[in-house]
Image (cartoon, helix red, strand yellow):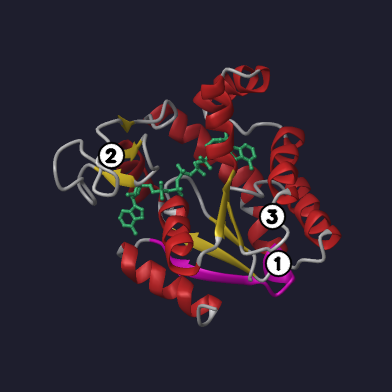
Amino acid sequence: MANIILLGPPGAGKGTQAKRLVEGRGMVQLSTGDMLREAKTSGSEMGRKVAAVMARGELVTDEIVIGLIQEKLTGHAGGGFIFDGFPRTLAQADALGALLAEMGQSLDAVIEMKVDDAALVARITGRYTCGGCGAVYHDQARPTKVTDVCDECDSTNMVRRADDTEDALRTRLLEYYKKTSPLIGYYHAKGALTSVDGLAEVAVVAAAISKALGAAP
Ligand code: AP5
């Protein structure tokens, strides 16, 4: 099955689209942000180390996130990976290429989700997530049908992220433009890049990604 990267700034809709690909195509979502948040919740030493860095909106070290991805890939030889929020630096991109090559896997597509900064602020400050199943909601664009009850799993545990503030978002955007946006040229040069309009409705973005990936297996 294809291996793909969803590339875009904070709030571009990477997590939202990754979940649709998991449901629609049976792919495996590998979100380094989710892995780091799990480490934080578990109270592990690494989780404690990264908590303050994440709350400020800065990037965690390459060494930590590459280690997390390596661990996850080891358990899934079959492929079909959606890399969500990884890679975020050129060093991470090189490491991913090497890890996939070791497994006899390839990178089949890099989907760049283009969204302008003004829309990102509204998206991030209105976001909340189901603590039970991870479904993503938005105060205006996608509220739960019943207030604070998850449409998918009926959980009433709705979570807002510590880094979803305007201050932290400013830092997250700076980090994106400085360290992550060079990956657009990196993957374009490899002939792997497709850009989609991330400002369109969720279903329209999903259709554009589906077109880029071709028919579901
Ligand atoms: P991470 O968890 O990866 O966050 P992010 O990249 O900032 O992206 P987000 O999860 O905020 O947004 P998204 O694009 O998934 O959007 P979503 O679908 O939720 O990283 C967090 C932190 O962890 C980093 O800052 C860093 O510290 C650390 N980290 C993680 N990976 C790392 C790495 N590789 N290296 C170093 N550090 C790392 O959508 C957002 C909102 O918009 C939702 O409310 C949604 O409902 C809504 N929405 C989505 N699509 C649409 C649409 N088409 N129209 C209208 N609304 C929409």
Residue labelled with disc 2: 126
Looking at the rendered structure, the number of numbered marks drawn on it comes to 3
**Which of the marked residues, 1 or 3, is nearer the chain's N terminus?**
3
**Which of the marked residues, 3 or 2, is nearer the chain's N terminus?**
3
Q: Is residue 25 magenta?
A: no
User: Which residue type does callout 3 highlight?
Assistant: His
User: Mark 2 and mark 1: span between their CA atoms?
Assistant: 33 Å
Under circle 3, the secondary element is: loop
Q: Nearer the viewer, residue 199 or 110?
A: 110
**Which of the marked residues, 2 or 1, is nearer the chain's N terminus?**
1
Q: Nearer the viewer, residue 143 or 23?
A: 23
Residue count near mark 1 (Cα–Cα under 10 Å), binned few <14, some 14–19, many ≥20? some
Where's residue 43, x and y in %?
A: 57, 17
Q: Is residue 190 above or below residue 35?
A: below
User: Which residue type does callout 2 highlight?
Assistant: Gly
Where's residue 89, x and y in %?
A: 70, 46
Q: Which mark is residue 76?
A: 3
Under circle 1, the secondary element is: loop
Residue range (magenta): 187-198
Q: Is residue 197 magenta?
A: yes
Residue labelled with disc 1: 107
Q: Is mark 2 within 8 Å of ligand 1?
A: yes
Residue 158 can be seen, yes or no = yes
Q: Quadrant of the C terminus?
A: bottom right
User: Which residue type does callout 1 highlight?
Assistant: Leu
2 or 1: mark nearer the eye = 1
3 or 2: mark nearer the eye = 3
